[in-house]
Amino acid sequence: MNLKLWISCGVAALATSAAAQDSNALAVDGEALLTEAAAPLHMENVDTIYSGWRFRASETQALQSDDFDNPGMIFVDQAIDLWAKVDGSEGKSCASCHENVEDFAGLRPTLPRVEDGELVTMENIINECRTERMGAEPWKWSKGNMTAMTALIGLQSRGMPVNVAIDGDAAPFWEKGKELYYTRVGQLDMACSNCHEDNYGTMIRADHLSQGQINGFPTYRLKNAKLNSSHGRFKGCMKNIRATPFKEGGEEFKALELYLASRGEGLAVETPSVRN
Ligand code: HEC
Ligand code: HEC
């Protein structure tokens, strides 16, 4: 079933509107963030890419423009405490080995990346430090301590353009992610592209459909009042089209994360962003 058919079944209402809103400029505490860029050459069907921020209502947008109003920052504060908290058999905290979290500036825009033939996300790196270097339990992908820490580390790169490697070692993972993006799945028989490439800018239920960019992750959602991982979001979208979601942290979602990151090449990191 295609999107228009699904909508005409009465599940949702479609109304065409401008591709993106007019209030274009995102500045957080005076620092301008790029929410629009020329699409990277590998995207054949789209000329301009937009951050999901551009599709949100002005009240939601405003929450992201001031760190005191951004509810995601509460979790960043929690991560600052976690940073210094000793955990595991080695009696170490993150701070025992990494002097300043600011040193991670520039890391977020380059992830996921390939290390020793494996595609590695920020969650993988953090858990490797926990299990291999601290003797601590790994954190669950979308649980509060993990999303808080990925937000704290991601925040150090806020404003920097997304810039992932997709050639060389990364190419097979990228190809796999691209294939998943365009493959129809679920009872509604839809692909990510059917919504986020073919129909962005339209209304789906009460939601203004975006390009499904991941430059703002982890994202604070008003809907569940917590930080959400990108894999958690992919899972939600798959459930919405009545597909069996892949596993968070699994090979499919990691490949999809790389491919989506590459579709946002040049957009500013907005972590932690605010969405509905
Ligand atoms: C026993 C020392 C040690 C502890 C404790 C530790 N790490 Fe690491 N971490 C390392 C080493 C060594 C590397 C790899 C070399 C590097 O890039 O600095 C690394 C790499 C990283 C990287 C990737 C850096 C990059 O630029 O590629 C991140 C992010 C990171 N650690 C986060 C954490 C977090 C978060 C914690 C606490 C939960 C933590 N680490 C605890 C030693 C440690
Ligand atoms: C039936 C339409 C539909 C399909 C198919 C769909 N999504 Fe979504 N998606 C949405 C809606 C609606 C939202 C919330 C509004 C928005 O940000 O676009 C959303 C949001 C997102 C976001 C959050 C964007 C942001 O700025 O925070 C991401 C990422 C995303 N989707 C990825 C995917 C991926 C990956 C797939 C394929 C596995 C997919 N979506 C399939 C409807 C869809």
Image (cartoon, rainbow, N blue to C red):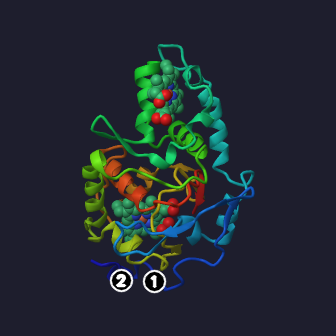
Q: Is residue 138 visible?
A: no
Quadrant location, the C terminus:
bottom right
Q: Are marks 2 and 1 in contact (CB under 8 Å)?
A: yes
Q: Is 43 or 152 nearer to us in this picture?
A: 43
Q: From the image, tell me which residue sits under label 2.
A: 4
Label of residue 249 in the image: none
Where disc 1 sits, the SS reads loop
Residue 62 position within the rendered picture, expressed as x and y whole percent measured from the top left = 70, 64
Residue 103 position within the rendered picture, expressed as x and y whole percent measured from the top left = 59, 34
Where disc 2 sits, the SS reads helix
Residue appearing at x 66%, y 75% in the figure: 23
Q: Is 204 or 50 nearer to us in this picture?
A: 50
Q: From the image, tell me which residue sits under label 1.
A: 14
Residue type for callout 1: Leu
Q: Disc 2 and disc 1: Cα gap in Å?
A: 8 Å
Residue type for callout 2: Lys
